[in-house]
Image (cartoon, rainbow, N blue to C red):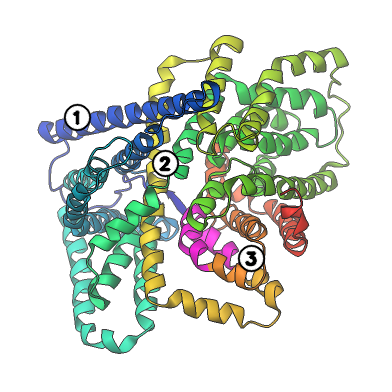
Amino acid sequence: MLVADSGDSRQGARGKALALRGVAWLAAIDGCLGKAVELAVSAILVAEVFILLVGVTARYVFEAPLVWSDELAELLFLWLAMLGAVVAFRRGEHMRMTFFLKKAGAQAQAVLQIVAIAGSLLFLVLVIPSAFEHANQERLITTSGLEIQAVWRAAAMPVGFGLMALSAILHLLKQATRFTFFATIAIGAAAIIFFFAINPLFGDLGSWNLVLYFVVVTAATVFAGVPIAFSFGLATVAYLSFTTDFPLTIVISRMDEGMSHLILLAVPLFVFLGYIMEMSGIGEVMVRFLVSLLGHVKGGLSYVLIAAMYLVSGISGAKAADQAVVAPILFPEMIKRGAKPGDLIALLAATGAQTETIPPSLVLITIGSVTGVSIQALFTGGLLPGFLLAISLCFIVWRRYRHDDLSDVKHVGGREIFRSFLIAFPALLLPFVIRIAVVAGITTATEVSTVGIAYAIILGVFVYRRFDWHRVMPMLVQASALSGTILLIIGAATAMAWSLTQSGFSNSLADMMTDLPGGSTTFLAISIVAFLVLGSVLEGIPSIVLFGPLLFPIAAQVGVNEVHYAIVVILAMGMGLFAPPFGVGYYMTCAIGKVNPDEGMKPIWGYLLALMIGIIVIAAVPWISTGFL
């Protein structure tokens, strides 16, 4: 499964560390580096919110657009992405697969932890010179609005890569023992000898080069525990170095392009909004109102959980933030009423898949940015499919809880429901404020997040009076780190997708898919199966960045509406993401709910079956996704 890279599993390591953990200067360098980067990235995120909010106000209220606001936001965005990736690297929070790592013995785990760091460092060392060259080339470009050299933006890449390389070296010095160090050297030497030994064959391998690098190398590094972004990067660098004449600067320029779409700025902003919503009590009052409405119905709190996830997903955009709001509020009361923790985790994970298309989903934003599909159309098209899947989950809830005894549950009176509604009313307005602002053309899909942030802060400070200013700094850092991991994956996957395109793979794939019997029906069926697998193995965003640009043109060729196709593959991918035993979303849900993953394995399959039937219906009836466009 994909999880945060803890970097602390060193059980069974033999020998002393290469550098003693108690060395004062080493700890001092690491601490100062971390604090400086966290302060910088927090300041940049605050600046982004301010710049976009001022731009919206100037354009809509004063009818005096600021010509430089988007350009400055884009300049700072690349710095936010790279420094956020540095924070995540220092904390060991880059996404990676640890399913096989946890099955290994203690000594093997210790070696693989060092292999993961060394693999990341190898990629960084290989691309840092190209990153400097790319930044130097940007000196020749002058921006139109700010009229400054583009190097001020491009410099974020060599600085970010350099800081991550320094952090990797410090991690190796603190964690590696003589045994793990020499074992890692042996593994690396064996890999190098292998590639040089078969180098004469590269010219004759043809398309098999793609299998060797983009399947074998990627799978080997991913399964070894190397973070996903660095695994993608290593495979791409190896492919270009051994089989083509392209300079490695093309990797940096593709990563720059993939990470620089201003629409992706919505990722850190909506993540930050989710944290504010949780801290200020907005999600809590929403859920409490729903409990007052349905708490006395058989399975009522399960219906509340489904409805709450539908509503909350329209605010935060991040599934972890959604679930972190709902679970602590509902789980204690549901367990008190006799629900089993495994059942709760199963339903919460299923709702995570169900709400993948509820705007402003980060996956919707990502798929729009990499495929060119209208973000506004995706926001509109995702609502009804999410509602249909909610109905399918409600049917399973009804079947499972229709015989419950609720004789001891107190029926909430109309006066209490009305009071709960009045308290929740300002919070319930937030999803509508966000959607109306986009639909009415007041803001873009990126800018609307700042409107949501401002509204949430006002509610927290003046309405619910639960705003803890001491938590703002940690939330800024955490939002930046999470965004850095996502954006670095997008950048690396963009470079890999470009390499696949240049190799002719996309044309071969298009020819194969368009020649399949059954036309659009077969194409949709294969896409559903493919993204179910990709969602569980690669996780949603990297798989959509990697394969979206390849498959969407094919969908157009076979006559599938682009919005309809986007909704179908996102739902299939979301189901794979939250399906055990490989789906990372399932384990993330278990961590949030503090429940052993084994307890939810059995009850989740009924919900997944309902979701699968719903996805098939949505795929078969395009109107469900496109009827309101």
Left or right: 345, with 146 as reference point: right
Whole-number angstrom distance, CA of label 3 to CA of label 2: 27 Å
Whole-number angstrom distance, CA of label 1 to CA of label 3: 47 Å
Q: Name the residue type under label 1.
A: Cys
- Locate residue 292, reporting x and y percent: 79, 23
Whole-number angstrom distance, CA of label 1 to CA of label 2: 22 Å
The residue that mark 1 highlights is 32
- Locate residue 179, reporting x and y percent: 18, 58
Tell me what residue is drawn at x 76 percent, y 30 percent.
337
Most extreme residue toward the front, as rendered?
64
Instruction: Determine if residue 309 is in view.
Output: yes
Q: Name the residue type under label 2.
A: Ser
Give whichever of 71, 397 is nearer the camera. 71
The residue that mark 3 highlights is 528
Left or right: 449, with 400 as reference point: left
Magenta stretch encompasses residue 541: yes
The residue that mark 2 highlights is 483
Q: Secondary structure at mark 1?
A: helix
Mark number for residue 474? none
Q: Name the residue type under label 3.
A: Ile
Answer few, some or many: residues within 10 Å of disc 1's Cα (few below 14, many 20 plus, some between 14 and 19): few
